[in-house]
Image: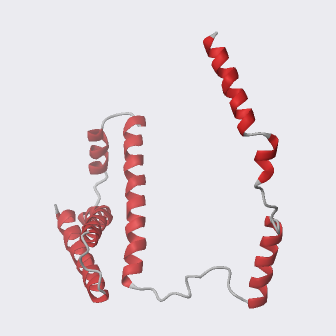
Amino acid sequence: MAVSLLRLASRRCLCVRLGPGLSTQHVVPMATTAKEEMAQFWEKNTRSNRPLSPHVTIYHWSLPMMMSISHRGTGAAMSLGVSLFGLSALILPGHFADYLDLIRSLSLGPALIYSAKFALAFPLTFHTWNGIRHLAWDLGKGFKIPQVYQSGVLVLILTVLSSIGIAAM
């Protein structure tokens, strides 16, 4: 009973505050519709012969730009790889040791095995070293243009060296 009375009182209070005149009193009609705005936008762009958006051919490809794209790509690829590896471990029959024995039974040459290990280690080490570079940037270090390029070259050198070392294991 008390809940019903409270609900009724609340509704009446809201109806008084939000009466029909109050809800439309401060509304200002729009001068143009969204469709008209879009038509004006495209007419202006057509008249000025501007491209739709900046294209990759406009930019000079720089080391920091390529490393940023590669960092995102390696992160996405490793995330997908780990997810697929985990999913396959759940779905496929047998144990991991069985699949290692299968790979060993293929009698692949050492050059192919080394290349495969290098291909697996490279994205991991690149993403790790470039992540450390980003942590340095988070500390406010290395924002000058020469330092950005130097740290980029250092990341690439460390990536190649650590990938070679991991693949040699």
Q: Quadrant of the N terminus?
A: top right
Query: Depth check: 26 or 93 in front?
Result: 26
Residue shown at 63%/79% (left/top)?
Answer: 53
Color scheme of the displayed model: secondary structure
Residue 138 place in picture, x, y as percent: 28, 68
Question: Quadrant of the rendered structure where residue 52 is?
Answer: bottom right
106 left or right of 10?
left
Question: Quadrant of the rendered structure where residue 161 is?
Answer: bottom left
Query: Depth check: 99 or 163 in front?
Result: 163
Residue 57 place in picture, x, y as percent: 56, 86
Q: Quadrant of the C terminus?
A: bottom left
* 45 relative to 10, above or below: below
Residue shown at 31%/52% (left/top)?
Answer: 106
Query: Depth check: 163 or 113 in front?
Result: 163
63 left or right of 49?
left
Question: Quadrant of the rendered structure where residue 94 is?
Answer: top left
Give the number of callouts: 0
Residue 133 place in picture, x, y as percent: 26, 71
Residue shown at 28%/46% (left/top)?
Answer: 100
